[in-house]
Amino acid sequence: MSISYDASRRLFKIDTPRMSYAFCIAAGVPIALYWGAPLHDPAALDAEIRSIKVNAHGAGAEPLRCECSTNDGVDYGEASILPIFADGVRGMRPAYESHSIDGDTLRVVIKDKYYDFTAVLCYRTVGKLDLIERWIEITNHTGAPVELPLFRCGNVQLPSHDNYRLTHYAGNWGAEYQPQRHMLHQEQVVLESHRGTCSAHQHTPFVTLDPDGEATDTQGDVFFAALEWSGENRMIVEKNAFGDVQLCAGWNDYDAEWTLRDGETLSSPKLAAGYSGAGFNRMTEILYDWQFDELCPQSKVHNVLPIIYNSWYPYEFDVREDNMLSLIDKAADIGAELFVIDDGWMPGRTDDKKGLGDWRPDPERLPNGLRPIADACHKKGLLFGLWVEPEMCNPDSDLFRAHPDWIIRSEHRENTLMRHQLTLNMARDDVRDWAIDWLDRLIDDYQLDYVKWDMNRYLTERGWPEASRADQRSLTIRYMQNVYTIWAHLNEKHPNVLFENCASGGGRTDFGMARYADRINRSDNSRPRDVPLLHEGFSRLFLPKTAGGAGNISNEALVPLDYRIHLGMTGSMSVGINLLTAAPETLDRLREALAYFKTVRADLQNAYVYTLVSGEKHTYTVFEYLRRDRRSVSVFVFGHPVREWTRVPALRLRGLIPDALYRDEAGNTYTGEALMKVGLRVSLFGDYDSRFMHFAEVK
Ligand code: DGJ
């Protein structure tokens, strides 16, 4: 890992083990030169440097491939910064001023030629990964406010190729992470979510580009970028008239802008740009390593996640002391390790029309509060968790009656309700502090081991009547900044508590929340037919061990229980079956399965996951879970509903140590080479047949 500056060439070079990235100062600004496989000799870039047209600001000239485009001169591409100064002048005319290299971080300072307005382009290498985090910090010393209708993370210039295939993950509620692919033409492709405070139901803020669309899972160049932002986002991929391709990303500015006061500094979100020279699987490995070794809460991410029993699927809002206490006994009996009371525990919350915002137990249905339930869990050796939705309230709540001004709303506009609820204005610091206060108290009062943070509606009527016009325009940005502050506080103050990130399922599955959450509600869709496809998309990017839901061993009784158990094993297992009405055979099978899962869980939850066979194109799906040290491997095979039997060709595994010996649970041994080259034979019969195989290295 190194960051170097070659003064004779004015060249910055960032080298990671399998990637180089280079740009230089030319025409007074940072210009992209190279991104791809390691480039050892800087002289290799001399011709590129010579070819930069220093008169590029002249009309008709080819635009420069700027590291931070500001729409200056003939640079017509998407800008990263677009200031409007107090006198009405628009745009920044940047000039390189200085730079510094401090360990893993390079900071290049550019300044407007006329106004005292600076932008620091930041580049940070991430451990030993082929990944660079990029962001911009701007400071206004002009003596007056500067409006910023556009402010993004910097421009990522792709290497020159005729054709790129663009892949991103989009979908909807219950159908998240669906891959979308197309060849990039001369066009601008805008990938975005603009529902306010949500990232991923519409578009996961992540994109890949591979030259000529030729990369496979195991071969070829793949360039990718992940935005660390959980509110609405915009990623713009552009191929211009000269065939150059660039990416520009940040929070979504379609209805948000910041006014930078005099003396103020503002940071853009971070964009992590990475490179794999060995196809999409290596990209996934890089993303996992980043999450395992840096991004996710480090004190917890290496532990196995407890098996959850959650009250939502069996009881929804019907939370009572008696049914919860009976469930606790049953949950402990089958071997669950964490009992979560989901929605429905607050005053009057017997449906979704009331009680949201009043964070105390319903005196009627929980007359003794939550204490007896917390105690019962702890006495049985179970952890105890609670569901909360801190960003919302029902109009029928004491909170709304006391603070009608805490709602996001516009004057002269009736509020649109979604799920009968309104959004609290988390951009307000008093609302943020109120949330911190009651969350801290709730965790302490009930010795919570787990908090499920839900978020169940999109923004409408985006107003903040008490704020200045300028601050109103920054509502969605300030909102997310404050949400992050609360999550950071919770992690710091309660380092042993596990936090789940849920937003109507996977509405906030992104690399911004990954920093704070131990578990992700992958989707509200736990239908066995859909889960393999959801998991394919999810596990391309995010740690499979975090993939949860209120019950990923679903209660869909027509599907064989073993199939549902196998699906539950692919992620953070939770049981959604009503244990009070389940048949004794079901309870016996669950008990046995949970006990078995515990014996392989550490391997499954510290693994790279490869989709060996995609359910997009086949009538079955195969996942390989390769422990990160490559000394254990597991295989899941999920047959889809089919007319008869499914023929499965040999399954050739990936990434094993060729001469290591692996033993399956029947005692058969195989070399890594045999498993990779000859493969495994599996037969599936009928609808919803599934297999799980586990192999460990023979020492
Ligand atoms: C949406 C979540 O995704 C579900 O798991 C559940 O918690 C409900 N909200 C509760 O309202």
Image (spheres, rainbow, N blue to C red):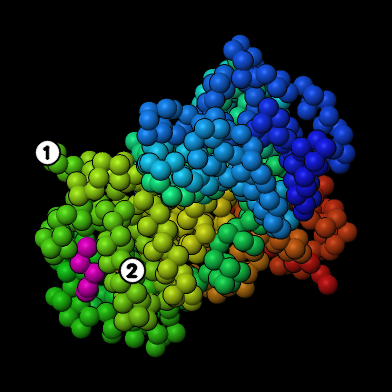
Give above or below for 588 relative to 150: below
Badge 1: residue crowd in 10 Å (few <14, some 14–19, many ≥20): few
Instruction: Tell me if residue 130 can be seen.
Output: yes
The numbered disc on residue 412 is: 1
What is the span of residues highlighted in magenta in the rendered image? Answer: 357-361
Give the labeled residue for mark 2: 436
Element at label 2: helix
Task: Name the residue type under label 2.
Answer: Ile
Residue 458 part of the magenta-drawn span: no
Which residue is found at the position 19% from the left and 46% from the top? 465
Q: Nearer the viewer, residue 82 or 346?
A: 82
Which residue is found at the position 70% from the left and 52% from the top? 101
Residue 174 rendering spot, x and y as whole percentages = 39, 45
| Left or right, 500 with reference to 22 | left
For the stretch drawn in magenta, what is the main secondary structure? Answer: loop
Element at label 1: loop
Q: Earlier in the sequence, mark 2 or mark 1?
A: 1
Residue 150 rendering spot, x and y as whole percentages = 44, 35
Residue 418 rendering spot, x and y as whole percentages = 23, 46
Which residue is found at the position 79% from the left and 63% from the top? 662
Q: Nearer the viewer, residue 150 or 695?
A: 150
Which residue is found at the position 34% from the left and 44% from the top? 474
Task: Report which quarter residue 483 is drawn in.
Answer: bottom left
Q: Is mark 2 within 8 Å of ligand 1?
A: no
Task: Name the residue type under label 1.
Answer: His
Residue at the outermost bottom position: 379
| Total marks in image | 2
Instruction: Tell me if residue 582 can be seen.
Output: no
